[in-house]
Amino acid sequence: MRLNIATWNIHKGIGGIDRRYRLQRIVDVLAPLHADIALLQEVAEAMPRAGNDTQLHLLSQALAMPHIAYSPQHRFSVGGYGNAVLSRWPLSNVVELDLTIGTRKKRGALQTRARVRWGRRTRSIVITNLHLGLAGSERGAQLDRFLASQPYRGLHARTPVILGGDLNDLWGTLGPKYLLPHGFARAGPLAPTFPAWLPVRPLDGLFMRGDLDVVDAGPLKSELTRRASDHLPLLATVKLQKK
């Protein structure tokens, strides 16, 4: 069975060029992708700068992705934002892992399971949505903490695992150093995703492990994606193996 997986820092729906809040642009990018699972970062709720919208529910309805999980990362006097997973398949076992290092900005991982059904078959896919810190040593410590955590550490090697998000991976070194030794493979070639209007840094990443084969993957570049956020989205088509 083939699945479309997307990851994107949507920057609260605030455009990367014009700095205007236009959540519809996010919808207009994601809807044609027909993603089965979307890992989104900086999803706002009740922020005045973002129209006081509860973006997760608006996106869920507009994209016909009814199953959602959310982990608030930053709270302000009014509103906040965080990581979200949207899915066409039921989600369960939602876990929020604190990846904050010392007094640095709060960071975290959102992990959940999607129960995918095709015909009479079902398989569980473990999904992890990350938003890592700005310092290199911070990102390394955060990945070490995640890789040592439960329930990830107890997963079977064949269990399908999707890991993605805004890794703030300035030099593209996090995959080879931390994830590949744990059996992950990058979906598609290393590609720049930031800033969206003239991408020079591969900040965002999408990795697979277990019974998932990557068919095609890469960043989405268009006039709309350059304007909708300050990051480009990544999309991967993967094949889920039978047990």
Image (cartoon, grey):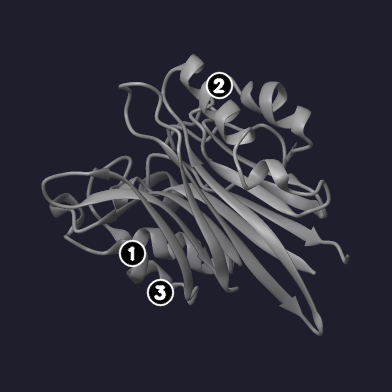
Residue 36, position as x, y percentages in the image: 61, 67
Q: CA distance from mark 3 to mark 1?
A: 9 Å
Residue depicted at 69% across the width and 31% down the height: 179
Judged from the image, the secondary structure of the residue bearing numbered disc 3 is helix
> Callout 1, which amino acid?
Gln
User: Which residue carries the number 3 mark?
Assistant: 62
The residue mark sitting in front, 3 or 2, is: 2
Q: Please report the residue visible at 61 percent of the width from the left and 54 percent of the height from the top.
A: 127
SS state under label 1: helix
Q: Residue furthest right?
A: 243
Q: How far apart are labels 1 and 2 at the CA level?
A: 35 Å
Numbered circle sitting on residue 140:
2
Quadrant placement of the C terminus: bottom right
> Residue at position x 46%, y 20% from top?
138
Q: Which mark is residue 24?
A: 1
Task: Of the two numbered discs 1 and 2 on the same chain, state the one appearing first in sequence.
Answer: 1
